[in-house]
Amino acid sequence: MSLVKVLSALVVIFLLFAGWTWWSGDAHQINRRLRALTDEVEKSPGEGQLTTAFKAEAVAAFFAEPFRFRARQFDFETTDRSTLVRSVAAYRLRSERIATEILYRHLEIDPVARAARMEIVVRFVGGWGGRAGEAYRFQLDWVEQEGRWQIGYVDLIEIVRPQGP
């Protein structure tokens, strides 16, 4: 076997290993979970109540056991999964459509504790209450449970008002 073939094989093996490490890395897994969560939050016009209920359950499935969700600005705090499901469903029912846009994200991972802290700024376009243009700064604390990253704590840090002209 020629030296070129051996080196080519080693490069391919290295690239496969690097790709697998990136794909299965904690940061990539957490970001995929966040993307899947925002997909579940989104709503298309004409969505029925049954779909709303399934989507609310799907959102709640991203949360760890136990968890805590806090949004002082809306006088809301819960550690109860059914309360979370009802709140998500109510938000979805009051909105004709919802699109999510992540404007900022910062992630810090503690690989020893199998925990991570994320700060995101997200805008819910078309969401309830005519709050167009507002974005929400959240702290999300992720924990790994049974091999899957789940949200253990959410805190709505602030409502970011749109900049005026």
Image (tube, rainbow, N blue to C red):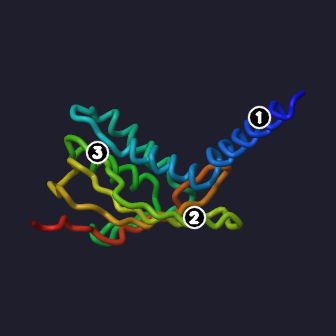
Q: Are marks 2 and 1 in contact (CB under 8 Å)?
A: no
Neighbours of disc 2 within 10 Å: few (<14), some (14-19), many (20+): many
Residue 63 or residue 11, whichever sits in front: 11
Q: Position of residue 127 (x, y in %)?
A: 23, 50
Q: Are marks 1 and 3 in contact (CB under 8 Å)?
A: no
Element marked by disc 1: helix
Residue furthest to the left: 165
**The C terminus is located in which quarter?**
bottom left
Left or right relative to 115: residue 31: left
Say above or below: 108 vs 125.
Answer: below
Q: Are marks 3 and 2 in contact (CB under 8 Å)?
A: no
**Residue at horizontal 27 percent and vertical 50 percent from the top:** 91
**Residue at horizontal 19 percent and vertical 64 percent from the top:** 162
Name the residue tied to disc 2: 116
Classify residue 23 by image quadrant: top right
Classify residue 6 by image quadrant: top right
Neighbours of disc 1 within 10 Å: few (<14), some (14-19), many (20+): few
Element marked by disc 2: strand
Element marked by disc 3: strand
**Residue at horizontal 19 percent and vertical 58 percent from the top:** 133
Name the residue tied to disc 3: 99
Q: Position of residue 76 (x, y in %)?
A: 33, 66
Neighbours of disc 3 within 10 Å: few (<14), some (14-19), many (20+): some
**The N terminus is located in which quarter?**
top right
Cα–Cα gap, marks 3 and 2: 26 Å
Q: Position of residue 147 (x, y in %)?
A: 67, 49
Q: Amino acid at mark 1?
A: Ser
Q: How many marks?
A: 3
Say above or below: 20 vs 84.
Answer: above
- Please tell me whether mark 2 or mark 1 is closer to you in this view: 1
Circle number at residue 8: 1
